[in-house]
Image (spheres, rainbow, N blue to C red):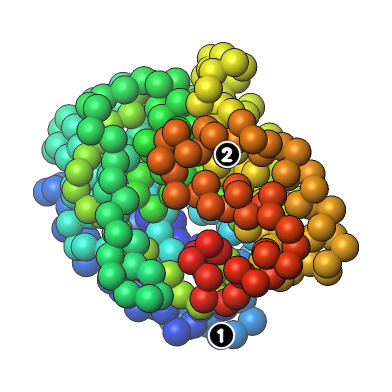
Amino acid sequence: MVLVSVVLPVYNDVDHAPSAVTRLLRQRLPAETRLEVVVVDDGSSDGSAQALQLVAAQDDRISFVRQSENSGVARARRRGVETAKGEWVWFVDSDDEWPDDAVGNLLAAAGVTPGRDDDTVDMVVADAELVPMTGGVRRISSPRSGRVTGSAAVEMLLTGDITGHLWNKLFRRRLLLQVEFPPAHVQSDLALVAGALSEARVVVPTSAVVYRYLKRAGSVITSSSRRAESLAVVERSVLGAARRAGVAEDNPALAYFCLRYIALSGVKDALGGAYDEATSRSLLRSLRRRIGVRGVVTLARRRDKRVALAVLAHAPRPVQVRLLNPSSRLLA
């Protein structure tokens, strides 16, 4: 019986994907438990599919799925979950790193031992490390509040106490089969996490570091692709999850989420160079109205470093142009 399925979506990453699969097979699990790696090639054209097929042929713990055309990481992940056989699912990306005891620590937090499984636990939230291209390491911490209900965890997501990353979380597969995988180009992880939390019964945090996210040039998070449409998809998905979780419409956490994750992400998008000047100006006008003075004050009171972006959205265009350059920390 497979206990954990690791879902690995791949698109044109022949340099990292085959070795990522091999590294995943080194995971140390409790006795009498089995891990599978579900690799979903999302229409790669660089030889990734062929290389991964060769790797999969050498180990029956690897399930390989190839999609005929590129459909986006959200759909690839959904396909992986549908293919998986495990009770639990962990998502990883092929160009990152993880310790060999990551799955074991996630299972331990969930209360899973040989012959025992706490059926009320649906998700585990762990710590991770983020490695910027400029060097150094930043800790991504899980809550230190102990076990919480899914609805309480949704509110923690809205305030940033739980991050929207997928790779530092363990999910029950049956939970993932209940929720949508919104096809947003950016922040689709956040939308999926919100949906899963809204349906979860119990969420358990652990301080174990289970992932090392490496920021690379050209990745979605560092690219200057147009994001306005995706941000709208994410906002609808997260607000829908909040309603299902019973979060009141006048809850300050909702307003803060829309300000921090949607409006300020929109400012970065509008100023990031992907739009012509007229479109950029139009987007910024809308975002300025949305942020307002109240938004700037809210961020300042929370000592949120993103207040600089909120102020910049209100600055004259010459100031924005002068302050923004490829090395600007405001767009980091």
Quadrant of the snapshot with the N terminus: top left
Q: What amino acid is found at the position of numbered circle 2 in the picture?
A: Val
Q: Residues within 10 Å of mark 1 (few under 14, many from 20)?
A: few
Label 2 belongs to which residue?
A: 296
Label 1 belongs to which residue?
A: 47
Residue located at (17% from left, 40% from top): 108
Name the secondary structure under disc 1: loop
Which quadrant of the view contains residue 277?
bottom right
Would residue 254 be visible to someone looking at this image? yes
x, y (%) of residue 31?
12, 49
Q: Is residue 23 left or right of residue 269?
A: left
x, y (%) of residue 39?
47, 64
Q: Residues within 10 Å of mark 2 (few under 14, many from 20)?
A: some
Which quadrant of the view contains residue 113?
top left
In the picture shown, does residue 166 fall above or below 217? Answer: above
Name the secondary structure under disc 2: helix
Would residue 230 be visible to someone looking at this image? no
Measure how far apart labels 2 and 1 are at the Cα level. Answer: 48 Å
Residue located at (65% from left, 72% from top): 322
x, y (%) of residue 278?
87, 63
Looking at the image, the residue that sits furthest to the right is 278
**Which of the two labelled residues, at mark 2 and mark 1, occupies the earlier sequence position?**
1
Q: Is residue 186 left or right of residue 161?
A: right
Residue located at (82% from left, 57% from top): 281
In the picture shown, does residue 197 fall above or below 192? Answer: above
